[in-house]
């Protein structure tokens, strides 16, 4: 049976093409970006740059892609991995921006704090005048 497997696979591929079903590559690079997410083949058409543009514009297509790719079992698909990378980048950028804002707020707040006791003349606490016994 093993020697017939390649012939059977080829025959089934031709049969699928003859029935009008798009191949995985045709699905990945066809006119429907959401259908491309279901393809087991990485899309050259709907790449990271494409999904990044959709994300930046916060389109309905982007929201649908994220929802589809977050559905259990879909995230491992090659094109959902691309969506996931774009999503991760955006989330990291948002987190970095929020952290920077928090740091700036803390720095501003620290300017209004009183200096610690014992540091009025710039000497270390417990350091009396040098050389006196």
Image (cartoon, rainbow, N blue to C red):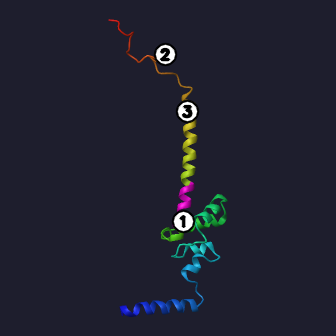
For residue 117, side relative to residue 107 (left or right): left
Q: Secondary structure at mark 3?
A: helix
Q: Is residue 70 visible?
A: no
Magenta stretch, main secondary structure class: helix
Identified at 61% across, 67% down, the residue is 64
What's the distance in space between the residues labelled 3 and 1, CA to CA? 38 Å
The quadrant in which residue 36 appears is bottom right
Q: Is residue 57 above or below residue 21?
A: above
What's the distance in space between the residues labelled 3 and 2, CA to CA? 21 Å
Residue 92 in picture, x, y percent from top left: 54, 52
Identified at 56% across, 59% down, the residue is 87
Region of the chain picked out in magenta, as a range: 81-90
- The tag earlier along the polypeptide, 2 or 1, is 1
| Residue to which mark 2 is pinned | 120
Q: Is residue 88 magenta?
A: yes
Residue 85 in picture, x, y percent from top left: 53, 61
The quadrant in which residue 69 appears is bottom right
What's the distance in space between the residues labelled 2 and 1, CA to CA? 57 Å
Q: Is residue 17 visible?
A: yes
Q: Which mark is residue 82?
A: 1
Residue 10 in picture, x, y percent from top left: 48, 90
| Residue to which mark 3 is pinned | 107
């Amino acid at each position: 049976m093993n020697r017939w497997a390649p012939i059977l696979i080829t025959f089934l591929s031709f049969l699928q093409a003859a029935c009008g079903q798009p191949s995985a590559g045709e699905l990945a690079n066809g006119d429907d970006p959401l259908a491309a997410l279901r393809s087991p083949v990485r899309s050259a058409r709907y790449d990271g740059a494409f999904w990044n543009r959709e994300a930046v514009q916060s389109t309905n297509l982007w929201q649908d892609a994220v929802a589809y790719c977050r559905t259990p079992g879909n995230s491992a698909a090659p094109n959902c991995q691309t969506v996931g990378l774009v999503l991760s980048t955006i989330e990291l950028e948002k987190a970095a921006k929020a952290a920077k804002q928090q740091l700036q707020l803390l720095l501003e707040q620290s300017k209004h704090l009183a200096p610690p006791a014992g540091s009025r003349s710039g000497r270390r606490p417990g350091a009396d005048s040098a050389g006196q016994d």
